[in-house]
């Protein structure tokens, strides 16, 4: 079918494939951000249950470094806020890509339908009607 497909339609198909790849990348980034957000929220909730004088350590690369409760809490709170914004941005980007994909898909369908109609009417006497 691609042999007799107009070049414009082939371009639209390539654009659709690119958009599909972009959508997959955005979905993966969104999933990663949401997972990090859930982990950070759980850690923040765990901090809420601790007493402020408790000895705490933070992972810095391969090391554990002593840290203050307030500093750890503030840093974690900022991380949660940042991840919430990131997840929201990725959600909007995912919606935009999906909308572009659907619009491009409709354009391609219209293009192919118009191209298919160039050979004459496809009513009762058109292709596939059988006959004697």
Image (cartoon, helix red, strand yellow):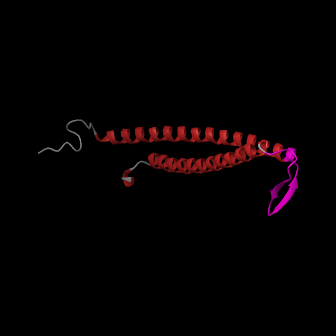
Q: Residue furthest bottom?
A: 62
Percent position of residue 15, x then y: 52, 47
Does 56 lie within the magenta span?
yes
Asked if residue 72 lies left or right of residue 91, the reply is: right
Q: Nearer the viewer, residue 14 or 47?
A: 47
Give the residues in magenta: 50-71
Q: Nearer the viewer, residue 126 or 36?
A: 36
Tell me: residue 60, above or below residue 92.
below
Asked if residue 54 lies left or right of residue 94, the reply is: right
Residue under the image location 20 percent in, 36 percent down:
124
Does 72 lie within the magenta span?
no
Q: Nearer the viewer, residue 102 or 53?
A: 53
Residue under the image location 19 percent in, 42 percent down:
129
Residue under the image location 24 percent in, 43 percent down:
127
Asked if residue 97 lies left or right of residue 47, the reply is: left
* Quarter placement of the C terminus: top left
Percent position of residue 67, x then y: 87, 52
Q: What number of labels is visible?
A: 0
Percent position of residue 58, x then y: 82, 55
Residue under the image location 45 percent in, 38 percent down:
106
């Amino acid at each position: 079918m691609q042999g007799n497909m107009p070049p414009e339609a082939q371009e639209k198909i390539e654009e659709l494939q690119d958009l599909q790849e972009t959508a997959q990348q955005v979905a993966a980034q969104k999933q990663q951000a949401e997972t990090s957000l859930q982990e950070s929220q759980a850690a923040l909730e765990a901090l809420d249950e601790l007493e402020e004088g408790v000895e705490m350590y933070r992972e810095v690369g391969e090391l554990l470094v002593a840290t203050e409760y307030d500093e750890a809490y503030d840093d974690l709170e900022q991380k949660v806020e940042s991840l919430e914004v990131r997840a929201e941005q990725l959600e909007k980007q995912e919606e935009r890509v999906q909308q572009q994909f659907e619009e491009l898909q409709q354009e391609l369908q219209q293009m192919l339908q118009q191209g298919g109609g160039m050979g004459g009417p496809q009513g009762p006497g058109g292709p596939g009607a059988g006959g004697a």
